[in-house]
Amino acid sequence: MTSTGLQDRSVVVTGAGGGIGRAAALRFAEEGAKVVVADLNPEGAEETVKSIETAGGTALAVIGDLSDQTVVDTVVERAVEAFGGLDVLVNNAGIMDRMSALADVDDAEWERVIRINLTAPFLLTRAALPHMLAAERGSLIFTASEAGLRGSAAGAAYTASKHGVIGLVKNLAVMYRKQGIRANAIAPGPTMTGIQVDADQGAHGPAVVGQFIGANIGRLGTAEEQAATIVFLASDAAAFVNGAILPVDDGWAAV
């Protein structure tokens, strides 16, 4: 079996209390990495940690809102203190919008989606970078979305947030490649994760995007399929991959 180079690496995965984040945390642990499970949901996070430890791996949970700078600082500090550094950061946590067209987006929806999907990854990456720069290596991986590649996959707030994530990834790749740091993202298509979309199907936004989504998507993906791609991007096999936005979507991005 070819080594992924992840043995004993320190990895932070956000949104790891379920879905893609949990699947990624479990997969990293299988590769011998030590994992910080960061999530707002204490029950989900502890369940992920228990699964890792039961299988013989090493993990710890940090609970809190990742759009809070204090929580962000705690996540990074725990990784460094417990595992000796921070090698891989997976900015996976996110929420959907209500599929709202821009004229129907209220301030609360806009601010919540942007704060969690874009500002939180910015805060966590900023906190992680000094440790990666000191080590002259690091892998930053983001969960973007098909909505970051097109305008017909979600509402205005979610679409803007994921386009922002992709811009952030590309800028990071350019800014820090000479310091040994890589930044990449997956762009999942519809995936079985349990993420909720509280959309009024009669509203303008869902009525417009629904016809495109229904006509163009392939099969639903699994969290494990997304996680496998995340782990690949963090591994030595992807050592020359930097600034890539990788659709994991059964060909939806090609339609």
Image: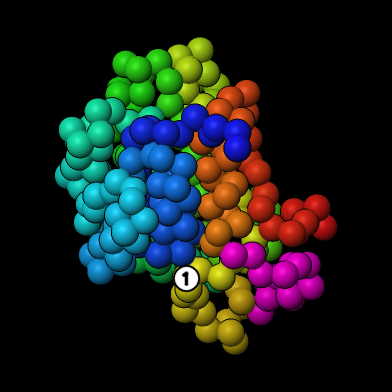
Mark 1 secondary-structure assignment: loop
Residue 217 lies, in percent from the top left, at 74, 67
Q: How is the image coloured?
A: rainbow
Magenta residues, start to end: 207-222
Residue 69 lies, in percent from the top left, at 22, 43
Determine which quarter of the picture holds residue 124: top left
Instruction: Out of 7 and 124, give the one closest to the viewer.
Output: 7
Q: Residue at x 36, y 56 (%)?
A: 55
Vertical side of 178 occupied by 41: above or below: below
Residue 125 seen = no
Residue 209 lies, in percent from the top left, at 67, 71
Q: Residue at x 54, y 34 (%)?
A: 4
Determine which quarter of the picture holds residue 64: bottom left
Residue 34 lies, in percent from the top left, at 33, 41
Q: Residue furthest top?
A: 178
Residue at which label 1 appears: 195
Kindly report the secondary structure that dominates the magenta region of the rendered protein.
Answer: helix
14 sits to left or right of 102 = left
152 sits to left or right of 80 = right
Q: Amino acid at mark 1?
A: Ile
Point out the image quarter for the C terminus: bottom right
Q: Residue at x 25, y 69 (%)?
A: 43
Vertical side of 233 occupied by 130: above or below: above
Was residue 220 drawn as part of the magenta stretch in this picture?
yes
Residue 192 seen = yes
In this rendering, the count of numbered labels is 1
64 sits to left or right of 12 = left
Was residue 200 drawn as part of the magenta stretch in this picture?
no
